[in-house]
Image: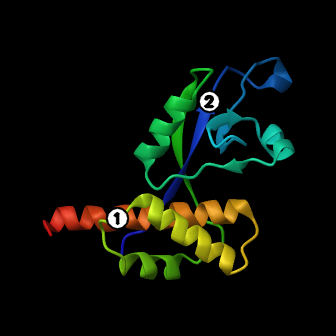
Amino acid sequence: MSSITIFQAMEFFGTGDPFFGGNAADWCLYHQEDGGLTFVASHEAQRRELVKAYFPTEIEAQEAGAAASGRKGRVSALPVTARAEVPTGQIRWLVGNRHVGTDDNELSAEFRSRAEGAGAADPDIIAQIVAYALACHRANQALCIALRL
């Protein structure tokens, strides 16, 4: 069975460690209060209680990062290890029983609702659950294309 991976976007900007006089500032992509995406330093994201943006594919993370980059730094899509609380086996099974033509928004809403109904209160875990479900969905869609179903 192939491994399912989710991704985050990170913007690398500047050169040299600030401790030694450099101006490097590497920021992750977060969901803003207004629903948009922005690159923010981790301490600022924590202060504003922002949720990190996770993506089902490397390409989607790269494209979202490029679109959100205000500093025009180097944007990379980095793989994320899902937190232990993310029920990956159950998600794979549930998504595997869905039609590959299911709309992403419908699938996202279902898994957000399931996570909240199961008592998940941490927005980061919910975001990872939704991204993992979409990553499984993308893998199923790719399999159908490969098998010409």
In this view of the protein, can residue 86 be seen by the observer? no
In this view of the protein, can residue 121 be seen by the observer? yes
Q: Which mark is residue 139?
A: 1
Quadrant of the drawing holding the N terminus = bottom left
Rendered location of residue 39, percent (x, y):
66, 34
| Residue under the point 27% across and 61% down | 142
Question: Please, what secondary structure does the residue beneath circle 2 have?
Answer: strand
Using the rendered view, name the quadrant where residue 119 is placed: bottom right
| Residue under the point 75% across and 65% down | 122
Of the numbered discs 1 and 2, the one sitting upstream in the chain is 2
97 vs 110: above or below? below
* Residue nearest the observer in this picture, 96 or 26: 96
126 vs 21: above or below? below
Asked whether disc 1 touches disc 2, contact meaning CB atoms under 8 Å apart, the reply is no
Q: Is residue 52 left or right of residue 104?
A: right
47 vs 142: above or below? above
Q: How many marks?
A: 2
User: Identity of the amino acid at label 1?
Assistant: Ala
Q: Which residue is mark 2?
A: 12
Using the rendered view, name the quadrant where residue 69 is placed: top right
User: Which of pointers 1 and 2 indicates the residue nearer the eye?
Assistant: 1
| Residue under the point 68% across and 32% down | 26
Rendered location of residue 105, percent (x, y):
46, 59
Distance from Cα at disc 1 to Cα at disc 2: 29 Å
| Residue under the point 58% across and 23% down | 73
Quadrant of the drawing holding the C terminus = bottom left
